[in-house]
Amino acid sequence: MITIDSCGWLEYYTAGPLAEEYGKYLKDLTQIVTPLVILYEVPSISFSLPNG
């Protein structure tokens, strides 16, 4: 199991410099654990970004 925090999800979805690295871990979503608070946090942060 792999835990992905908000920084990881934001990096991946905004195509940041480390997006490819995070993408390697996100290929098998059955192995990902994301805390519930992150599920609420990521959308609220992404909507506040310039292109969100």
Image: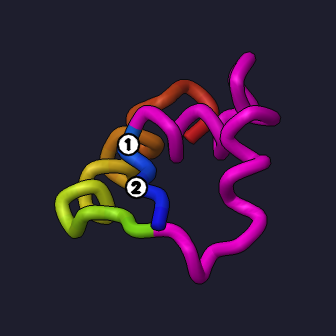
Please tell me whether residue 13 is drawn above or below residue 15 in the rendered image. below
Q: Nearer the viewer, residue 30 or 40?
A: 30
Estimate the x, y position of residue 20 in percent, counting from the top left: 81, 35
Q: Amino acid at mark 1?
A: Ser
Indicate the quadrant where residue 35 lies: bottom left
Please tell me how many numbered marks the rendered image carries.
2
Gap between marks 1 and 2 measured at Cα: 10 Å
Please tell me whether residue 13 is drawn above or below residue 36 in the rendered image. above
Q: Residue at x 50, y 68 (%)?
A: 32
Estimate the x, y position of residue 49 in percent, counting from the top left: 48, 29
Magenta-highlighted residues: 7-32
Q: Residue at x 77, y 65 (%)?
A: 27
Q: Which mark is residue 6?
A: 1
Q: Residue at x 68, y 59 (%)?
A: 26
Does residue 22 belong to the magenta stretch?
yes
Q: Residue at x 37, y 45 (%)?
A: 5
2 vs 37, left or right, is: right
Nearest to the eye among marks 1 and 2: give it: 2
Q: Nearer the viewer, residue 44 or 12?
A: 12
**Other residues around mark 2 within 10 Å, as few (<14) / some (14–19) / many (≥20):** few
Q: Which mark is residue 40?
A: none
